[in-house]
Image (cartoon, rainbow, N blue to C red):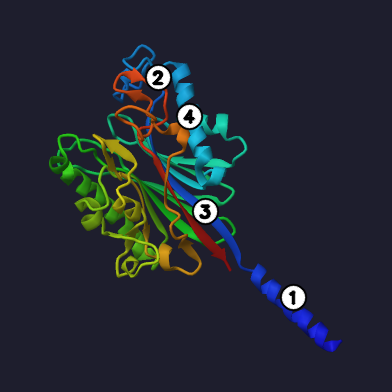
Amino acid sequence: MKLKIIVLLFMLAGSVTFSQNEESEIYIASWNLENLFDNIDDPDKRDSEWLVDGAKQWSNDRLDKKIKNLSKIIRYMNDLEGPDILGVQEVEHQHLLDTLLSRHFCDKNYKISYSETLDRRGIDNGVIYNADKFEHVETLSHEVKLDSGYPTRYVFQTTLQLVNSNVILHTFVNHWPSRRGGKEKSNPNRVRAAETLVAAMEKIYVEEENPNIFIIGDFNDEPENESLLKTLGAAKFFCDSTLSYGDKRFYNLSYDEFSRGWGTYLFRGNWNMLDQIIVSRNLIDDTYFNYICNSFEIIKPELMVTRTGPYKGAARPTFGGRTYLGGFSDHFAVGAKFIIVKE
């Protein structure tokens, strides 16, 4: 009888120890929303084509449909649970994200971190985060100063803290200068954006030995381009491979899919992996907070995939040139899962 009691107590002690380590899964995503404009004239922005009587005839009905379409894809993410952190690009004003959440996500405790930039097109970066899991700590905007003096999007930083925990996450949302004028000619602009990002992160490394950093967004470059591979130093990453680890600070979770010929944006029949998720080394080898291997994905539900024609397989955009298509975005989103173990 005493032996049975001892065994029972041992089993109970083991179960109590296990319960003290709680696992929390989080889903990080990034999506270029493709010109999420309102139809109100902003004299400080080049938005004339997005007015009701503008070239796009951007009526309330068209805007409402755009917002509803975006909500469908966001709902689809994370096995229909929605993302915990979503970095967004190409948003004219925060009130558009407010409308998205108030109309279509009343059941979610989503909040927004956002900042206006000097970009003349009026398309900025922001973060939607699950306030049930995270508390907002800080928002910073890092200006990218191009040699031309032309204003472009800021590198947008949002710092969050996991609730009931001391775990800090630094998320950098990027929308680097386009390839307008040619990839080579415009390359210095994206290198400058990468330099701005690196400088911002250096400040974190001064204060934290092993920070949790997410670098997400539309980089207008691919994983093997100079801005990402050399300036940022985002190393190739393959799960379950000795090639995955080294002395690099950052690893590109998008690289495996890129190496298979996939991408998020179809341009002249070729896939471009412009939208990526890059993480600090701590997030691939830490015991308590780490990437779930092979969970990186290009998010492309059937409803947003073009089915016929020369753009078959591409994301269904809102417009094809000046033709209204009533789609979603010209970019597919990307996402990845991580596990946090609370001691």
At a point 65% along the width and 71% down the height, the residue shown is: 18
Q: Earlier in the sequence, mark 4 or mark 2?
A: 2
Where residue 145 appears, as percent x and y from the top left, is: 22, 43
Look at discs 1 and 2 and give the one toward the viewer: 1
Give the SS element for disc 4.
Answer: helix
Check disc 4 and report the residue beneath it. Answer: 69
Q: Quadrant of residue 93?
A: top left
Amino acid carrying label 3: it is Ile
At 17% across and 45% down in the image, what residue appears?
A: 187
Q: Is residue 116 visible?
A: no
Which mark lies nearer to you, 4 or 3? 4
Badges 4 and 3: C-beta atoms under 8 Å apart?
A: no
Q: Residue 40: give its label.
A: 2
User: Residue 26, which numbered label?
Assistant: 3
Cα distance in 3D space between marks 1 and 4: 50 Å
| Spatial CA span between label 3 and label 1 | 29 Å
Question: First in sequence: mark 2 or mark 3?
Answer: 3
The amino acid pointed to by label 2 is Ile
Residue 102's place in the image compared with 13, above or below, is above
**Screen quadrant of the C terminus:** bottom right
Q: Nearer the viewer, residue 95 or 241?
A: 241
Residue type, numbered disc 4: Asn
SS under mark 2:
loop
The numbered mark, 3 or 1, whose residue comes first in the sequence reads 1
Considering only vertical position in the picture, is 43 above or below 141? above
Spatial CA span between label 2 and label 3? 36 Å
